[in-house]
Image (spheres, rainbow, N blue to C red):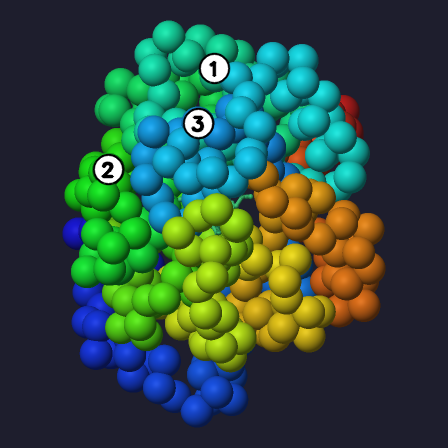
């Protein structure tokens, strides 16, 4: 039996069923999503992830949305793989500002095997700071996924990006099946899967439904589902794309929450262009994770203090990292064990 089925999670959604959810009256959809959210999560906690671009620009791929593709002139300065000291410095700052996960991204089609030792060192050092680790480096072979997992990488991000049908309009240098293969290699290695997509690229509602169907019908739901609103960058083929209706964006979040009840749904790129009311509505629809950093990979994100103010005004707290939770649990277990030992000792003496 598939792991999802043991938890009553479905991975046989049809597109029509998903489109019926999209078609619900807005309040009914939000109520259903918020109900599912409350059954599975603390509705007043949001997970915070900090992003760092560890290798910027000059990417050989042709993803039409991306400022880092070498094919478009976006004026982005190119950078080689960052020195480990710079990565650790940024990770320490992320930890100090209250983030629980550090996500490192590289503008690669896939990592070269020669880069793997440096990548493994980054994973070890960041994890030693008590942060969860995530990377997004492009396609991974089975062996590469195993190596990253062994080095302690908690999450690997690799997005489906859009529906299978619309995919060819956006990227031609790698296939949808290539993406599924990488996700399968990541799963097999034991790492957690972070996979989502982008909306606002001129796709139709059936494509947004198709993206969510692709994610929800994976053999196991991704642990984390980033929903990005396209950031329109001058010089990319999508610079003048029409805005997506904000309510349609919220609907996409709500449907993701309903289809993947136990996954973290991340209100991802695009927050800089969203007002606070829209972000609050995304949390109401079931989003429970954000990128918390002044810069995404190459484009601006809201400032950390304005995010903290927003979360405070909404009565939302940052979620503790699983490492911190584990440490606290270990400490509690230790105290319990000591207390039990002391009691045993007393009983022994009394007897
Ligand atoms: N190069 C690797 C890859 O593509 O697999 C990893 C980095 S890539 C920048 C990670 C993801 O960022 C993409 O899959 C895409 O979903 C998202 N992304 C890139 N540019 C974006 C944009 N302009 N707006 C929203 N999301 C974007
Ligand atoms: C994801 O889904 N979104 C992030 C992360 N995974 C790597 C990236 C967003 C990039 C937005 C454009 C930029 O800043 O370059
Ligand atoms: Fe390269 Fe990733 Fe950007 Fe595509 S999304 S162009 S693979 S950096």
Label pair 2/3, CB-CB below 8 angstroms: no
State yes or no: Cβ of the residue under disc 2 lies below 8 Å from any atom of ligand 3: yes
Dot 1: what SS? helix
Question: Considering depth in this image, is 289 or 329 the residue closer to the camera?
Answer: 289
In this figure, which residue is indicated by the disc labeled 1? 120
Question: Considering depth in this image, is 192 or 107 the residue closer to the camera?
Answer: 107
Dot 3: what SS? loop
- Locate the C terminus by quadrant: top right
Mark toward the start of the polypeptide (2 vs 1): 1
- Residue 333 placement: quadrant: top right
Numbered mark located on residue 241 in the image: none
Numbered mark located on residue 58 in the image: 3
Q: In the image, 118: left or right of 114?
A: right
Q: Is residue 107 visible?
A: yes
Dot 2: what SS? loop
CA distance for labels 1 and 3? 23 Å
Numbered mark located on residue 173 in the image: 2
Question: Considering depth in this image, is 40 or 123 the residue closer to the camera?
Answer: 123
- Residue 194 placement: quadrant: top left
Q: In the image, 54: left or right of 113?
A: right
User: Residue sitting at 28 percent across and 46 percent down?
Assistant: 171
User: Residue sitting at 39 percent across and 88 percent down?
Assistant: 24
Question: Considering depth in this image, is 235 or 209 the residue closer to the camera?
Answer: 235
User: Residue sitting at 75 percent across and 56 percent down?
Assistant: 307
Indicate which label's residue lies in the foreground, 2 or 1.
Answer: 2
Q: Residues within 10 Å of mark 2 (few under 14, many from 20)?
A: few
Q: In the image, 310: left or right of 243?
A: right
Mark toward the start of the polypeptide (2 vs 3): 3
Indicate which label's residue lies in the foreground, 1 or 3.
Answer: 3
């Amino acid at each position: 039996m598939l792991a999802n089925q043991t938890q009553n999670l479905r991975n046989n959604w049809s597109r029509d069923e998903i489109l019926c959810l999209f078609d619900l009256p807005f309040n009914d959809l939000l109520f259903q999503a918020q109900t599912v959210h409350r059954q599975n999560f603390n509705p007043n906690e949001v997970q915070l992830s900090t992003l760092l671009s560890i290798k910027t620009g000059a990417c050989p791929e042709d993803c039409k949305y991306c400022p880092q593709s070498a094919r478009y002139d976006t004026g982005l300065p190119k950078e080689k793989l960052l020195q480990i000291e710079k990565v650790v410095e940024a990770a320490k700052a992320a930890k100090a500002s209250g983030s629980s996960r550090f996500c490192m991204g590289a503008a690669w089609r896939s990592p070269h095997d020669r880069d793997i030792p440096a990548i493994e060192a980054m994973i070890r050092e960041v994890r030693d700071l008590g942060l969860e680790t995530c990377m997004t480096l492009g396609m991974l072979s089975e062996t590469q996924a195993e190596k990253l997992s062994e080095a302690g990488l908690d999450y690997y991000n690799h997005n489906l990006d859009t529906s299978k049908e619309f995919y060819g309009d956006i990227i031609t240098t790698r296939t949808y099946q290539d993406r599924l293969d990488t996700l399968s290699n990541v799963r097999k290695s034991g790492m957690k899967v972070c996979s989502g997509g982008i909306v606002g690229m001129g796709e139709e509602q059936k494509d947004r439904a198709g993206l969510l169907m692709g994610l929800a019908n994976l053999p196991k739901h991704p642990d984390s589902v980033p929903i990005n609103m396209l950031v329109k960058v001058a010089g990319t083929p999508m610079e003048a794309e029409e805005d997506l209706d904000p309510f349609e964006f919220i609907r996409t979040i709500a449907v993701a929450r309903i289809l993947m009840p136990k996954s973290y749904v991340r209100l991802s790129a695009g927050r800089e262009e969203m007002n606070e009311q829209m972000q609050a509505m995304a949390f109401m629809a079931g989003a429970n994770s954000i990128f918390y950093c002044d810069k995404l990979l190459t484009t601006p994100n809201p400032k950390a203090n304005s995010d903290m103010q927003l979360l405070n005004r909404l009565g939302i707290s940052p979620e503790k990292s699983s490492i911190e939770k584990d440490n606290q649990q270990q400490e509690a277990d230790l105290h319990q064990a000591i207390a039990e030992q002391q009691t045993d000792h007393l009983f022994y003496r009394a007897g």
